[in-house]
Image (tube, rainbow, N blue to C red):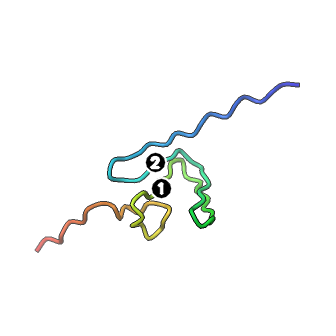
Amino acid sequence: MPTEPAEQPRRARMVRGGPLMIEGPVELVDADGNTVLCERFQVAVCMCRRSKRYPICDTSHRPRKSPEK
């Protein structure tokens, strides 16, 4: 009986001052046990907890520029 090849590990990359980038698709489980399925080819996971879409990053960690006058 042939054996199936081992699945390649997912790659996760930490971005200094930003999100954790994970090759998708991925299923995320937060500290409360809530599950989020992300089917994108790359998923940005919020590390600063400022995201309104937590645990998905919405770039809230970026400094905001003041509007020009």
Q: Which residue sits at x=32%, y=52%?
A: 17
Please, what secondary structure does the residue beneath circle 1 have? strand
Residue type at mark 2: give it: Met
Q: Residue type at mark 1: give it.
A: Val
Q: Residues within 10 Å of mark 2 (few under 14, many from 20)?
A: some
Which residue lies most toward the left here? Answer: 69
**Viewer-nearest residue: 26 or 48:** 48
Q: In the rendered structure, are the residues bearing label 2 and label 1 in contact, judged by CB atoms less than 8 Å apart?
A: yes
Residue plotted at (60% across, 62% down): 36
Element assignment for label 2: strand
Q: CA distance from mark 2 to mark 1?
A: 6 Å
Q: Which residue is mark 1?
A: 45
**43 with respect to 34 (left or right):** left
User: Eyeballing the image, is 27 above or below 2?
Assistant: below
Q: Is residue 56 left or right of residue 39?
A: left
* Residue lying at 59% horizontally and 49% vertically, measured from the top left: 25
- Which image quarter holds the N terminus? top right
Q: Quadrant of residue 7?
A: top right
Residue 5: image location, x then y, percent = 72, 28
For disc 2, the marked residue is 21
Q: Earlier in the sequence, mark 2 or mark 1?
A: 2
